Image (spheres, helix red, strand yellow):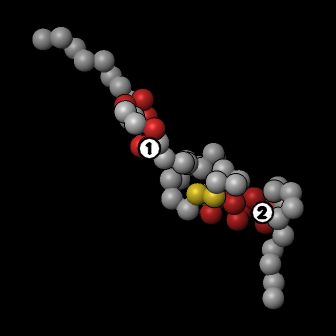
Amino acid sequence: MAKKSIVTRESRRKYAVQVRNRCKICGRPRGYMRRFGLCRICFRQFALEGKIPGVVKSSW
């Protein structure tokens, strides 16, 4: 019996619609902010550390 080549999950995407945006840091698919390329958790962490320019903590 012929062996099938091992194909990763990401390379099996048949349609472009199936591609999921993921956080650049942790790879989390949910809570993704397109503008920054980060998930909400990583965004908050980087913002509090001052690593994202122009982002300040809001207060009202």
Image x and y of residue 60, in percent: 81, 88
Provide the secondary structure element on which disc 2 rests: helix
Residue farthest toward the left in the current orientation of the protein: 1
Gap in angstroms between the C-alphas marked 1 and 2 = 30 Å
- Give residue 44's quadrant in the image: bottom right
Give the residue type at disc 1. Answer: Val
Residue at which label 2 appears: 47
Are there few (<14), some (14-19), or many (20+) residues within 10 Å of tag 2?
A: some
Q: Which mark is residue 34?
A: none
- Left or right of 43? Residue 23 is left
Quadrant in which the N terminus is drawn? top left
Label whose residue precedes the other's in the sequence (1 or 2): 1
For the residues carrying marks 1 and 2, which lies nearer the camera in this image? 1
Give the residue type at disc 2. Answer: Ala
Residue plotted at (18% across, 11% down): 2
- Give residue 5's quadrant in the image: top left
- Left or right of 36? Residue 9 is left
Image x and y of residue 22, in percent: 55, 48
Does residue 16 lie above or below 58 as drawn? above
Residue farthest toward the top in the current orientation of the protein: 2
Does residue 10 lie above or below 36 as drawn? above
Are there few (<14), some (14-19), or many (20+) residues within 10 Å of tag 1?
A: few
Residue plotted at (54% across, 48% down): 21
Provide the secondary structure element on which disc 1 rests: helix
Image x and y of residue 14, in percent: 37, 33
Residue at which label 1 appears: 17
- Left or right of 43? Residue 3 is left
